[in-house]
């Protein structure tokens, strides 16, 4: 069995990587399976810098190829915030509910037509003796005034995708992966992974 390591401790991301890579015959492991793996500080100013920091740190620890994901929500009316701070927007405890509450409070006076937003996902794949591969995916949406749906994670309940007429938390895994920033980025990497079979 082929095994792939995703350098993430986020269970929501882990589920989405498993959904996409399992049908390709990969057993997907994440850092939730390796509690002793080091914590990599996300000190970068961009998604790409943070994805690279996580991928390089964890590839060195395992001495093998890994993939890292740095992602977040950029809200136009908030000049792109929370951006790279999406996970810890309301504090270091990384509380999804508190993050949503903070965004809704900040957008309180903002009318529907100005509540446009975008999810970004940057993936970095790297390992010993190779140049990193970087891909990006995006998804456009609108921030609602209250939560809808219970699936997914993070800001999914307030992120409405006009193309499907649902919030990301109202979609099943297949629907979300078909249009999401992460799904779009993983599909770009999938070609690279197919061509590198036997190396990963
Ligand atoms: O509603 C959402 N649906 C998504 O599909 C999604 N993707 C990212 N995000 C938000 O952006 C942060 C990433 O920050 P992040 O890349 O640093 O990841 P993280 O700290 O959660 O885990 P790790 O991979 O670093 O271990 C996450 O925590 C979420 O708040 C999402 N929210
Ligand atoms: Mg993080």
Image (cartoon, rainbow, N blue to C red):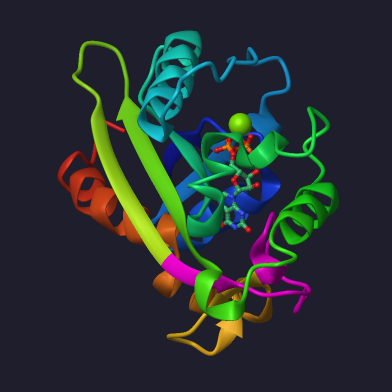
Residue at screen point 37% across, 58% down? 138
Q: Which range is magenta?
A: 140-158
Residue 13, given in percent of the width and then of the height, sits at: 59, 49
Q: Residue furthest left?
A: 195
Residue at screen point 43% across, 9% down? 60
Q: Quadrant of ligand 1?
A: top right
Residue at screen point 44% across, 18% down? 53
In depth, the one of 165 and 199 nearer the eye is: 165
Asked whether 75 falls inside the magenta stretch, the response is no
Q: Residue furthest bottom?
A: 165
Residue 142, given in percent of the width and then of the height, sits at: 54, 73
Residue 111, given in percent of the width and then of the height, sits at: 62, 76
Q: Is residue 47 above or below residue 102?
A: above
Q: Left of 93 or right of it: where is 13?
A: left
Residue at screen point 67% across, 39% down? 87
Q: Left of 121 or right of it: where is 110?
A: right
Q: Is residue 163 above or below residue 185?
A: below
Question: Taken as a whole, is the magenta stretch helix, strand or loop?
Answer: loop
Residue 63 appearing in the image? yes
The quadrant the C terminus occupies is top left
Across the whole image, how many numbered discs are drawn on residues? 0
Q: Which quarter of the figure has residue 10?
A: top right
Asked whether 155 falls inside the magenta stretch, the response is yes
The quadrant the N terminus occupies is top left
Q: Is residue 156 above or below residue 83?
A: below
Residue 167, given in percent of the width and then of the height, sits at: 62, 78
Q: Which quarter of the figure has residue 104?
A: bottom right
Residue 24 appearing in the image? no
């Amino acid at each position: 069995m082929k095994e792939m390591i995703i350098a993430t401790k986020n269970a929501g991301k882990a589920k989405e990587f498993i959904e996409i890579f399992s049908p390709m015959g990969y057993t997907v492991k994440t850092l939730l399976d390796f509690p002793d793996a080091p914590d990599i500080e996300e000190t970068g100013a961009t998604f790409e810098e943070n994805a690279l920091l996580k991928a390089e740190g964890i590839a060195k620890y395992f001495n093998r190829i890994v993939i890292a994901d740095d992602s977040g929500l950029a809200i136009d009316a908030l000049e792109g915030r929370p951006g790279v701070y999406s996970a810890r927007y309301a504090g270091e405890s990384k509380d999804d509910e508190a993050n949503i509450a903070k965004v809704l409070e900040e957008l309180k006076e903002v009318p529907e037509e100005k509540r446009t937003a975008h999810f970004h996902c940057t993936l970095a794949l790297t390992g010993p003796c190779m140049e990193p591969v970087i891909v990006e995916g995006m998804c456009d949406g609108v921030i609602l005034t209250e939560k809808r749906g219970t699936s997914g994670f993070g800001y999914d309940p307030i992120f409405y995708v006009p193309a499907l007429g649902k919030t990301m938390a109202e979609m099943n895994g297949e629907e979300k992966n078909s249009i999401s920033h992460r799904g779009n980025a993983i599909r770009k990497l999938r070609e690279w992974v197919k061509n590198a079979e036997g190396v990963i």
